[in-house]
Amino acid sequence: MAELTHFQDGRPRMVDVSDKKPTARTARAEATVRLTPEAAAALKKGGAGKGDPLVVAQLAGIMAAKKTSELIPLCHPLPLSKVSVDIRFDEDAALVHVVTEAKTTAETGVEMEALTAASVAALTIYDMLKGASKGLEIENVRLLYKSGGKSGTWERG
């Protein structure tokens, strides 16, 4: 059974990474926002009076990745070398797909930064379109890929 590294003697702890060597690390994550017909129509028109929801969500995702250690209590602050947020509106399926990538050279991984970016970008889309409909759904927030560090590369199959 895998060890839960953020607990010691049943108490939460920040993992000591001081003995680890910095390595190049990358993580990709995704989230999907399922739109109602009203929200899809509002997005197609350019938003619900607050500006372009996808542009605002892209910036929000980037900003969120940079703040991950302030939001997730046991995350280490990391020197991010790259954060990208790609957002695509699938009008036919009434879905917005968010894919994020975070990179660093550090002693610990960037999975939480990629996941935070995807989550906050999706939440921002919800916020920007909730005036058109409250029935939006955020789905499938998940890690797609990670590389670097002792555990090496992992990719969702």
Image (cartoon, helix red, strand yellow):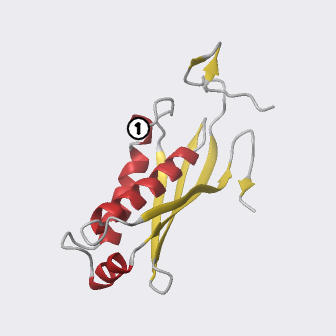
Q: Between 40 and 58, which is closer to the camera in this rendering?
A: 40
Q: Residue 12, relative to residue 145: is it above or below?
A: above
Question: Which quadrant: the N terminus?
Answer: top right
Instruction: Indicate the quadrant containing the C terminus: top left, top right, bottom left or bottom right.
Output: bottom right
Point out the residue furthest to the left here. Answer: 49
Where residue 138 sits in the image (x, y, percent)? 46, 61
Q: Residue visible at 66% across and 29% down?
A: 20
* Residue sitting at x 47%, y 42%: 79
For the residue pair 82 and 129, the one nearer the viewer reads as 129
Task: Pick out the residue farthest to the bottom.
Answer: 92
User: What residue did someone put label 1 on?
Assistant: 71
Amino acid tagged 1: Leu
Judge from the rendering whether residue 148 lies leftward or rightward of residue 37; answer left or right: right
Q: Position of residue 14 (x, y in %)?
A: 55, 24
From the viewer's perspective, tell me whether residue 62 is left or right of residue 17: left
Reply above or below: 88 against 14. Answer: below
Which image quadrant is residue 22 in?
Answer: top right
Percent x, y for residue 147? Answer: 68, 51
Judging from the image, what secondary structure is the residue with disc 1 in? Answer: helix
Q: Residues within 10 Å of mark 1 (few under 14, many from 20)?
A: few
Q: Which residue is nearer to you in this view: 69 or 48?
A: 48
Residue sticking out furthest to the top: 9
Residue farthest toward the front in the current orientation of the protein: 135
Instruction: Write the residue at 41% across / 73% down.
Output: 35
Q: Please state the total of marks drawn on the protein image.
A: 1
Residue 54: x and y in percent read 35, 71
Image point 39% across, 75% down: which residue? 36
- Residue 91 to residue 17: above or below: below
